[in-house]
Image (tube, helix red, strand yellow):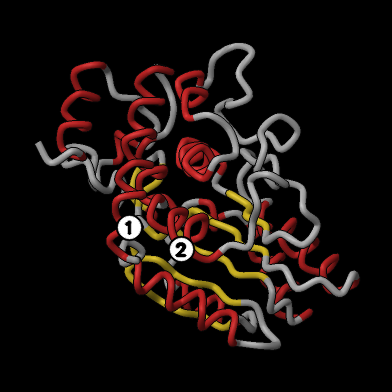
Amino acid sequence: MATDLKATATQIRTDIIESLAAAGSGHPGGSLSCTDIMTVLYFDKMHIDPENPNDPDRDRLILSKGHAAPALYAALAERGYFPREDLLTLRKRGSHLQGHPNMNDTPGVDMSTGSLGQGLSVANGMALAGRLDNKDYYVYVILGDGEIQEGQIWEAAMSAGHLGLDHVIAFVDHNGLQIDGSNDEVMTVNPVADKFVAFGWNVLSIDGHDFDAISAAIDKAKASTGKPTAIVCETVKGKGISFMENAVNWHGSAPNAEQAAQALSELRGE
């Protein structure tokens, strides 16, 4: 299974680079850092049906760090929600794949995101609705570590803990960098795990690029009842592309043709 997931993740990273190069703008760093999390969710763990994207019993995923939309779009295309050719229309006029996800235009998108800090609150609402409707779906939310500097995240964390929303599973994409520099320079978010524990969450810390660890953490989260789970994922900004890894300047800069060619060559092992 891990071998298949690795191949899928490589394809998603390839699609991210190609779509960003075609667009001439966008956010590669944080898209590449959350790719492996996205891969495990869409190709191993989530109860979803591309033929019925609005199934009321489906699991939900909220990409709260909406600027990482290229990773979400690539995963959805690979999963069959829309043709892969659409990825090359990223950020173009008339495309359903804009710079941030729009649930009204794109099949498989469960929440329109872009303004940071709001995804966890919506995840709480979805989980509460599921509880009231006696549904058993899970709500997954991917948070950026820079994003959790937003106060609304911690109001939502407090609410989820108080309400015992055990069908909320949050991933913190802890790559240590944000648009203006490192988290520690801008506004430290550490200790991330201890903060979620303080708000009554079950907390797991893993390597966010280890498919087996991601899968096992999700299983542990589902086995934990009475409280939400935060999975703190140690990741690498720009993962998979040598000149993008741990480089803050690739937070929001698209590769040119030459850079894209080098990136694609690395992903293909050439």
Q: Residue furthest front?
A: 51
Q: Residue furthest right?
A: 132
Q: Quadrant of residue 213?
A: bottom left
Mark 2 — residue?
189
In the picture, which quadrant includes the C terminus? top left
Callout 1: 10 Å neighbours few (<14), some, many (20+)?
A: few
Secondary element type, mark 1: helix
Of 239 and 223, the residue lying toward us: 223
Q: Is residue 40 above or below residue 9?
A: below
Q: How far across and down, in percent of the image, does residue 51 sit?
A: 68, 44
Q: Is residue 123 above or below residue 96?
A: below
* Residue at the (32%, 57%) spot, across then down: 4
* Residue at the (69%, 74%) spot, across then down: 167
* Residue at the (40%, 50%) spot, across then down: 35
Which label was assigned to residue 196?
none
Callout 2: 10 Å neighbours few (<14), some, many (20+)?
A: some
In the picture, which quadrant includes the N terminus? bottom left
Between the residue at mark 1 and the residue at mark 2, the CA separation in whole angstroms equals 34 Å
* Residue at the (53%, 52%) spot, across then down: 147
Q: Is residue 230 above or below residue 36?
A: below
User: Is the Cβ of the residue at disc 1 closer than 8 Å to that at disc 2?
Assistant: no
Tally the marks.
2
Of 181 and 233, the residue lying toward us: 233
Look at label 2 and name its amino acid: Val
Of 132 and 205, the residue lying toward us: 132
Q: Residue furthest left?
A: 270
Mark 1 — residue?
4
Q: Is residue 138 above or below residue 48?
A: below
Look at label 1 and name its amino acid: Asp
Q: How far across and down, in percent of the image, does residue 246 sit?
A: 24, 47
